[in-house]
C-alpha cells in the first residue's frame, strides 16, 4: 500500500462496533499510510465542513452489523465508499464471536 486510505469504523456500542474500532486501531498502528475517520464527528457535521477531507482518500467502511450505518452516514454526506466490510459477515467464518462489549 503506497497511497493513503481511510478506514471508517462503526461507532455503535454493540460488541461488533467495538471489534471494528479495535481492528482499525490495530491496523493503523501497523500501516503508516492509514488514517481513521471518526463516524460520530462525521455524522454530527451538519454543515458538511469535513466533507472535502472525507473525499481526499479512498474510504473502507467497517460496519458492525447488517444495518450498514457507516455507509449510510457517508452516502448522506455525498461521500463514495471504495469498499465495505461487514464484521458480522467476517466473524461468521470463524469460531469466535463478540457478545459483550
Image: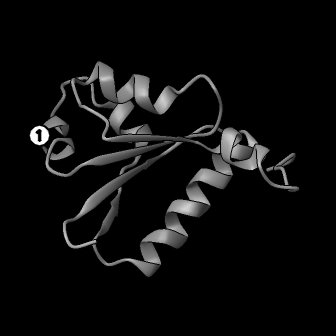
Q: Where does residue 70 sit, x and y in percent of width and height?
A: 46, 33
Q: Where does residue 30 sit, x and y in percent of width and height?
A: 45, 80
* 19 up-or-down from 51: above or below: below
Q: Which residue is mark 1?
A: 52
Q: Where does residue 65 sit, x and y in percent of width and height?
A: 65, 32
Q: Residue furthest top?
A: 76
Colour approach in the figure: one colour
Secondary structure found at label 1:
helix
Q: How many marks?
A: 1
* 88 up-or-down from 56: above or below: above
Q: Front-most of 13 and 20?
A: 20
Residue positioned 87% across, 45% down in the render: 99
Q: Is residue 13 left or right of residue 75?
A: right
Q: Is residue 65 left or right of residue 34?
A: right
Residue positioned 49% across, 70% down in the render: 27
Tell me where residue 92 sits by quadrant.
top right
Q: Front-most of 16 and 80?
A: 80
Q: Where does residue 23 sit, x and y in percent of width and height?
A: 58, 62
* 64 up-or-down from 24: above or below: above
* 97 up-or-down from 77: above or below: below
Tell me where residue 78 sits by quadrant.
top left
Q: Is residue 88 left or right of residue 51?
A: right
Residue positioned 23% across, 64% down in the render: 4
Residue positioned 84% across, 50% down in the render: 97
Callout 1 crowding tier (Cα within 10 Å): few <14, some 14–19, many ≥20: few
Q: Quadrant of the N terminus?
A: bottom left
Q: Is residue 59 left or right of residue 72?
A: left
Amino acid at each position: 500500500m503506497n497511497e493513503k486510505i481511510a478506514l471508517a469504523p462503526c461507532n455503535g456500542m454493540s460488541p461488533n462496533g467495538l471489534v471494528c474500532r479495535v481492528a482499525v486501531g490495530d491496523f493503523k498502528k501497523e500501516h503508516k499510510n492509514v488514517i481513521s475517520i471518526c463516524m460520530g464527528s462525521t455524522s454530527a457535521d451538519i454543515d458538511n465542513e469535513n466533507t472535502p477531507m472525507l473525499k481526499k482518500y479512498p474510504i473502507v467502511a467497517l460496519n458492525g452489523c447488517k444495518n450498514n450505518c457507516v455507509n449510510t452516514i457517508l452516502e448522506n454526506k455525498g461521500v463514495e465508499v471504495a469498499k465495505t466490510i461487514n464484521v458480522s459477515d467476517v466473524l461468521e467464518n470463524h469460531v469466535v464471536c463478540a457478545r459483550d462489549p
